[in-house]
Amino acid sequence: MARKLKIPNHVKKRRDRIETLRKEGNKIKRRYFLIVCEGEKTEPNYFESLKDALPKGVLEVCDFKIVGTGNNTTSLVEKAMQLRTDWANQTEKPIDKLWIVFDKDSFTAQSFHAAIQTCTTNHPLVDAAWSNEAFELWYLLHFHFYNTAISRKQYQDLIEENFKEKGLKNYKYKKNSIEMFTLLETYGSREDAIRNAINLENLYADTTDFANHNPCTKVHKLVIELFGLDEALEEESEN
């Protein structure tokens, strides 16, 4: 059984507000989010599982489309922007937020930096949930704070070690597992992961040489937004 998720007070308030608006017959605007992942399975599997854990009401007023592309370098950003355009043209429902999830380990330092810069300077804005070196850093931060560079092999070993310490004695990491989100919610702490990610982010607050921000991840920003969509939606409904 997955650990029961804690629902923040502002989420509860928004849920109550949605119920009030619904009872009063007010139409609640639906928003559309597109998450484009560099990986074809690991990241999409994580976010697809996360959808099932979102507080009641979020999916009722928001649509999430999660795509794994297998693209790398700046072609990923271009692909994501094209997917946003295609979605809007096909459905006549414009994407309100576009997020791209990618790792440093698939990029040269120059391409990695260029991809991030393209996201931050593009109009409309593209949000980047990048990790250096790999998405698995986000998994590790559910258990401990890590502030030294980690290799691809070390990620796997440390993930297995952490789960074994929590009682899964025979655990073997499977990169494309569809169970990872549930396992992390059960044996790790999403709250700790967010806190640890923010602490890592603060270590590099004054520099923009992103390829040297190792270890670092921005995945927490996307996770926070997915669980905190109520704030933006509540503001919208009040306007």
Image (cartoon, helix red, strand yellow):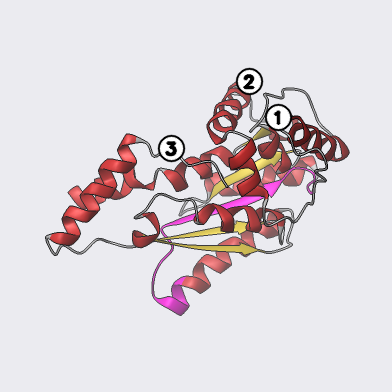
Which residue, given by chain and number where applicable, does mark 1 sit on? 213
Amino acid tagged 1 = His
Which residue, given by chain and number where applicable, does mark 3 sit on? 6
Which residue, given by chain and number where applicable, does mark 2 sit on? 203
Secondary element at tag 3: loop
Judging depth in this view, the residue of 83 and 9 nearest the camera is 9
Distance Cα–Cα, label 3 vs label 1: 31 Å
Distance Cα–Cα, label 2 vs label 3: 28 Å
Secondary element at tag 2: helix
Q: How many marks?
A: 3
Residue 159 drawn at (x, y percent): 77, 37
**First along the sequence among labels 2 and 1:** 2
- Tell whether label 1 touches label 2 (CB within 8 Å): yes
- Residue, x 33% and y 42% (percent of image)? 11
Secondary element at tag 1: loop
Residue 156 drawn at (x, y percent): 82, 40
Categorize mark 1 by other alpha carbons within 10 Å: few (<14), some (14-19), many (20+).
many
**First along the sequence among labels 2 and 3:** 3
- Residue, x 21% and y 49% (percent of image)? 17
- Tell whether label 3 touches label 2 (CB within 8 Å): no
Residue 90 magenta-highlighted? yes
Residue 147 drawn at (x, y percent): 72, 22
Amino acid tagged 3 = Lys
Numbered range of the magenta stretch: 88-107
